[in-house]
């Protein structure tokens, strides 16, 4: 039994002695807004309370003035966030949002009470790994779509999106921007803040696990070629010949335009999960869901419209779901005069529907969809030609002859329809396939898979460190923060925890910062080559 208790959540293995230089302090998996914001904070940018600023919350104002000369990242975040209320369940997310956008939930447009300083000596060596360009899933969304949140709520610290839009001569519609502009803004942010050297794009992580402590300094063997993009890695840590903590081993491959995949393996003292949820659409788990006419992303509808595989005089398309993505699909199909069957499990007047949480003046298009759902059911005709709403229905199965079988949840009545295409748009799940058991052991309920709404990763509320796995952190949708304005609080919490830990180590080991760097002279152009400990071409 004692041996079982020693087993690490992430598959602890026997101690190894990897080749090469010292491990990184932090590896961040995911280069969306969470990963970018965290890289900004780990790069030495520090937030301070402006001397002349006045926060509308008098209690928070008193707390901020009390330590005005101390960076927010070095203050007690629990103390600062106590008593604050907002639209996130995570107190640090509410705190950071309140500092960046005071009174935003009340329609106010107040300046941030923070000023930012670049303090290079506070830099923490880190590497951000992402599949695509900086911005993550924002590059995968239809570019002409308007963001749900206000444009100002999409911005990252210390770079106003309105100023950037003005420079690019782009316009803001109803105080919102297109998803294409947001994706470009995140790319520009990385360049503007000088974060490129810490972000490696085109990388796919395939494995993260715990390994035992080992020496990583010169003399233990040669250094394998890294295969990570040059000029895109962080500086290594000073030598650590007698480490006492376990490390994380991160394996993956580099995506190449030639189709050749190169593998990499790096080690880190801490890992931050910032992967989001966009790349793994949720499924119904029913018969026929894998048939070729059944899709799970709105982009496939757009492609079908372009190729005229769905048309006005064809059988209707089936749209399943009552969220904003399903609403976007309804709008897109209705605009193209394509007949629609819209199936969803809730009642049309269910207060939990997202439409009931959106102001009508700001989101008229979504309220139009909600109106369609209410007024044009299967049993009642309405003004919306070609659209039929089927509330409180579920899909039982799909058949190879393009038939779908639906069932009323209340009465059990079944209906059979011929359809030209089915779109299952019921949300998405995180892709944590690189973790043992897909990370299920990290959830609030370890018996269930990780789900961003029903079973998020269990974290310390003020550091975002995993309760189950020390040294592992999670931010963004994985811990319930789905909006850009709130996921930045996770970056603040993680950076604050790591900065405080760094200072604690420095206080206990004054000579630590003067240790020589492993492998001698490391230039920015070959840093990645020195930090990767194993590699090869597959």
Image: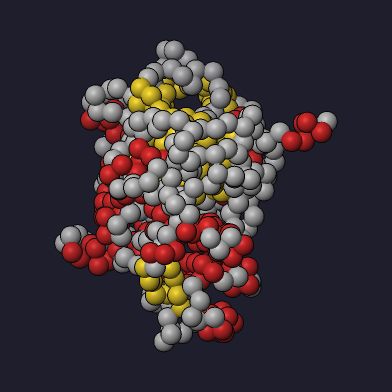
At horizontal 53% and vertical 47% (from top left) the residue drawn is 240
Query: Which residue occupies 56% across, 25% down?
Result: 285
State the residue in front, 40 or 437.
Answer: 40
Specify whether residue 135 is in view.
no
Q: Is residue 254 left or right of residue 34?
A: left
Question: What is the x, y in percent for residue 538?
Answer: 37, 19
Q: How many numbered circles does the render carry?
A: 0
Q: Residue at x 46, y 85 (%)?
A: 54
Residue 135: horizontal and vertical position, in percent? 34, 48
Whether residue 110 is visible: yes
Query: What residue occupies the far left of the structure in this picture?
Result: 169
Way the structure is coloured: secondary structure
Q: In the image, is 79 to the left or to the right of 274?
A: right
- The residue nearer to you, when weighing 142 against 415, is 142
**In the picture, which quadrant includes the N terminus?**
top right
User: Residue at the right extreme?
Assistant: 1
Image location (x, y in percent) of residue 409: 62, 33
Relative to residue 313, is residue 105 depicted above or below?
below
Nearest the eye: 293 or 261: 261
Residue displayed at 77% across by 31% down: 4
Horizontal side, residue 85 vs residue 156: left or right? right
Q: Quadrant of residue 58?
A: bottom right
Q: Position of residue 182 (x, y in %)?
A: 30, 53
431 or 233: which is nearer to us? 233
């Amino acid at each position: 039994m004692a041996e079982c208790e020693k087993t690490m959540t992430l598959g602890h293995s026997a101690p190894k002695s990897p080749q090469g230089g010292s491990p990184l302090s932090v590896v961040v998996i995911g280069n969306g807004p969470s990963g970018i914001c965290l890289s900004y904070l780990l790069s030495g940018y520090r937030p301070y309370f402006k001397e002349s600023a006045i926060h509308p919350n008098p209690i928070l104002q008193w707390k901020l003035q009390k330590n005005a000369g101390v960076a927010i990242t070095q203050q007690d975040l629990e103390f600062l966030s106590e008593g604050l209320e907002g639209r996130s369940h995570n107190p640090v997310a509410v705190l950071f949002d309140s500092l960046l956008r005071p009174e935003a939930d009340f329609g106010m447009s107040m300046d941030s009470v923070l000023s930012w300083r670049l303090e290079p000596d506070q830099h923490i060596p880190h590497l951000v790994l992402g599949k695509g360009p900086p911005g993550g899933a924002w590059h995968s969304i239809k570019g002409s779509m308007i963001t749900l949140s206000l444009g100002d709520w999409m911005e990252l610290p210390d770079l106003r999106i309105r100023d950037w839009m003005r420079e690019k001569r782009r316009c803001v519609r109803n105080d919102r921007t297109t998803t294409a502009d947001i994706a470009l803004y995140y790319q520009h942010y990385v360049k503007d803040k000088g974060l490129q050297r810490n972000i490696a794009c085109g990388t796919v992580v395939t494995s993260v696990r715990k390994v035992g402590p080992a020496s990583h300094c010169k003399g233990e063997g040669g250094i394998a070629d890294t295969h990570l993009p040059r000029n895109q890695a962080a500086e290594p840590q000073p030598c650590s010949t007698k480490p006492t903590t376990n490390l994380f081993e991160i394996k993956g491959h580099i995506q190449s335009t030639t189709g050749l995949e190169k593998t990499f393996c790096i080690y880190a003292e801490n890992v931050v999960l910032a992967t989001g949820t966009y790349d793994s659409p949720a499924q119904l788990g029913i018969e026929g869901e894998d048939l070729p006419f059944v899709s799970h992303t709105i982009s496939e509808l757009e492609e079908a419209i372009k190729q005229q595989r769905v048309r006005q005089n064809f059988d209707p398309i089936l749209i399943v779901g009552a969220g904003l993505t399903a609403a976007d699909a309804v709008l897109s199909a209705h605009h193209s005069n394509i007949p629609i069957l819209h199936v969803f499990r809730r009642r049309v007047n269910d207060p939990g529907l997202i439409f009931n949480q959106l102001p009508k003046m700001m989101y008229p298009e979504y309220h139009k969809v909600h109106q369609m759902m209410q007024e044009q059911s299967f049993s009642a005709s309405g003004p919306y030609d070609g659209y039929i709403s089927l509330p409180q229905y579920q899909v039982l199965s799909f058949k190879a002859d393009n038939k779908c079988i639906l069932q009323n949840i209340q009465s059990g009545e079944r209906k059979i329809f011929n359809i030209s295409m089915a779109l299952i748009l019921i949300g998405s799940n995180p892709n944590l396939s690189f973790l043992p058991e897909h990370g299920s052991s990290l959830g609030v309920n370890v018996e269930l898979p990780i789900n961003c709404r029903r079973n998020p990763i269990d974290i310390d509320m003020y550091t975002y460190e995993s309760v189950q796995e020390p040294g592992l952190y999670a931010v963004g949708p994985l811990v319930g923060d789905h909006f850009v304005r709130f996921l930045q609080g996770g970056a603040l919490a993680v950076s604050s925890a790591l900065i405080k830990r760094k200072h604690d180590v420095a206080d206990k080991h004054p000579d630590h910062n003067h240790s020589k760097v492993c492998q001698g002279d490391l230039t920015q152009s070959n840093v990645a080559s020195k930090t990767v400990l194993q590699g090869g071409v597959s």
